[in-house]
Amino acid sequence: MEATVLALGVVGSVGQFSHFHRTGRIELPLDELASFVARYVVHSVASDEEAVNTTLRAVATPAAV
C-alpha cells in the first residue's frame, strides 16, 4: 500500500507542475521545470540524503552508450 500512495504522490506532483506550466502559473523553460520536478520527486521519496545524492548523480551522469 505504501508504494501505491508514494506513486500517487509522484503522479499528483508531476501533474500539478505540468498544469501550472500549461496555464502560465510557472514561467520556466520546460527543461528547467523538468529538472526541478525530478529533484523534487527524488527528495520526496528518498529514504535519506545519501540516497538523494546517489540518485541525482546517476541522473546527471548518463551511462555511456
Image (spheres, grey):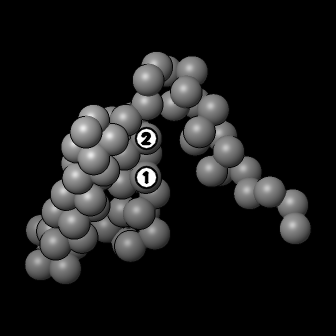
Residue lying at 57% horizontally and 21% vertically, measured from the top left: 50
Residue lying at 58% horizontally and 41% vertically, measured from the top left: 56
Which picture quadrant has residue 20?
Answer: bottom left
- Mark 1 Cα shell of 10 Å, populated few (<14), some (14-19), many (≥20): some
- Give the left or right position of residue 37, taking residue 31 as reference: left
Residue lying at 55% horizontally and 27% vertically, measured from the top left: 51
Q: Nearer the viewer, residue 20 or 42?
A: 42
State the residue lying farthest toward the front: 1
Looking at the rendered image, the quarter that the N terminus falls into is top left
Question: Residue 43: horizontal and vertical position, in percent?
Answer: 39, 35
Secondary structure under the numbered disc 1 in the rendered image = helix
Three-letter residue code for mark 1: Ala
Which picture quadrant has residue 63?
Answer: bottom right
Three-letter residue code for mark 2: Val
Q: Is residue 14 above or below residue 43?
A: below
Q: Are marks 2 and 1 in contact (CB under 8 Å)?
A: yes
Q: Is residue 26 above or below residue 63?
A: below
- Give the left or right position of residue 63, taking residue 20 as reference: right
Q: Is residue 31 above or below residue 22?
A: above
Q: Which mark is residue 7?
A: none
Q: Nearer the viewer, residue 30 or 45?
A: 45
Give the Cα distance between marks 2 and 1.
Answer: 6 Å
Secondary structure under the numbered disc 2 in the rendered image = helix
Q: Which mark is residue 38?
A: 1
Looking at the rendered image, the quarter that the C terminus falls into is bottom right
On the image, numbered disc 2 is attached to which residue? 42
State the residue lying farthest toward the bottom: 22
Asked whether residue 6 is in view, the answer is no
